[in-house]
Amino acid sequence: MNYRIKRMALALSVPLLCLGWSTAALAKPEPEACIELGALAYDNWTKADAGGSGMPAGETYSDYVRCKSCHGWDRLGLNGGYVRRTRTAERPNAGLGDLNAVSRDIAPGLGNYYEIDAEDVLHEGSGRAFEDGSGSWVPLDANPTPENVADHASGFTLGNMHPDFSTTGVNAGNTVLTQDQVDCLVDFINFADADPKFYFDTIDTDQNPAEYVINSGASATAGRSFYVENCKACHGEPGEDFNGANGGHPAGGIAAYLAGDGKYSEFVHKARWGIPDTLMTRAAIGTPDSQDMIDVMLYLQEYIAVETDFAITGGISGTWYLEERDGEGFLIDVAPRDGGTWELVATY
């Protein structure tokens, strides 16, 4: 059984739950469509493409109600790409500097090895009010008093709390997630094929920016083909600041964007599932699977290593060869070691 078949078998073994919390008998989307809806809702459930109907009253900044804002794009919280994310008046973080030590890690694979259910999404009776999001922010004064320090710490923690998305809690009567969004968020987060363990062998958060070691089943050659077919028209070459149909996003080009801390986990979510309410839909990017994602990420890591100052990182793991010398080349495997060092093994 090859890698792709094994991966598909694992994905199909995950139960797709139908957790209704309304008395209305609504038809749940088909499994594949539901997972896609859940992925978009995880990004920003207030968007129309994600099944939403706008921002709830009492909150100005969408980051305070988005799942990714505290759990991270990889759902690993402080164990992943959001390990150094800061808290500001406009966004929460994954708990860095928070008085609340509850883990924001909800990834079954590289994370805590559990599956979520509807109650974990709703936080009925335990979540905060929407207005306690950005409204909780108390900045530190230039010369803070003990009262100012206490207010800042208390507000910091309150704003990082999970909102109550139920129809009976503190936000009852306001805009909350629909039944489909709740059901499909559960299915997406529990979907084995979208877990970070299928994208990354390791994420070394001791490095800054975090080092991502792509799954060893990746092919940079296949990744280049995927990029040319599905990404280049809008984004240009990875190192190009290209103002195409994407409106020039990301600024500086894909390679510059990926140099930021934690960006590979954001990239893989958006490149696989799309971005709600934009031209970057899942259909527009070729309905990729996890194999496509690890292939294109390995290609981009190798591109960056070649086009910039060469460094030994997890990004150069894979096969290296010249097209004109078919059948010859090197198999390189790079793994992180303690103390921020790397171990390289090359086989001819």
Image (cartoon, grey):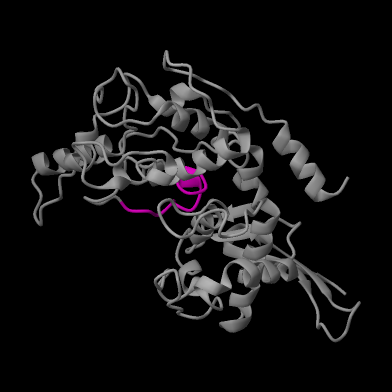
Q: Nearer the viewer, residue 82 or 228?
A: 228
Farthest residue in the top direction?
23
The spot of residue 129 in percent (x, y) is 24, 29
Considering only vertical position in the picture, is 15 above or below 316? above
Q: Nearer the viewer, residue 215 or 8?
A: 8
Quarter of the image that includes the N terminus? top right
The secondary structure that most of the magenta stretch takes on is loop
Residue located 62% across and 33% down the image: 31
Q: Quadrant of residue 304?
A: bottom right
Q: Nearer the viewer, residue 70 or 286?
A: 286
Q: Nearer the viewer, residue 98 or 11?
A: 11
Left or right of residue 322, residue 86 in this image = left
Q: Is residue 72 magenta-colored?
A: yes
Quarter of the image that includes the C terminus? bottom right
Residue located 74% across and 71% down the image: 221
Q: Quadrant of residue 339?
A: bottom right
Evaluate whether residue 313 shows in this view: no
Residue located 38% across and 46% down the image: 69
Farthest residue in the right direction?
327
Question: Which segment did they paint magenta?
Answer: 71-86
Left or right of residue 13, residue 269 in this image = left
The spot of residue 247 in percent (x, y) is 39, 71
Residue located 27% across and 37% down the image: 157
The spot of residue 330 in percent (x, y) is 83, 74
Left or right of residue 58, residue 177 in this image = right
Considering only vertical position in the picture, is 307 above or below 297? below
Q: Is residue 69 magenta-colored?
A: no
The spot of residue 222 in percent (x, y) is 73, 67
Left or right of residue 317, residue 287 in this image = left
Evaluate whether residue 308 shows in this view: yes
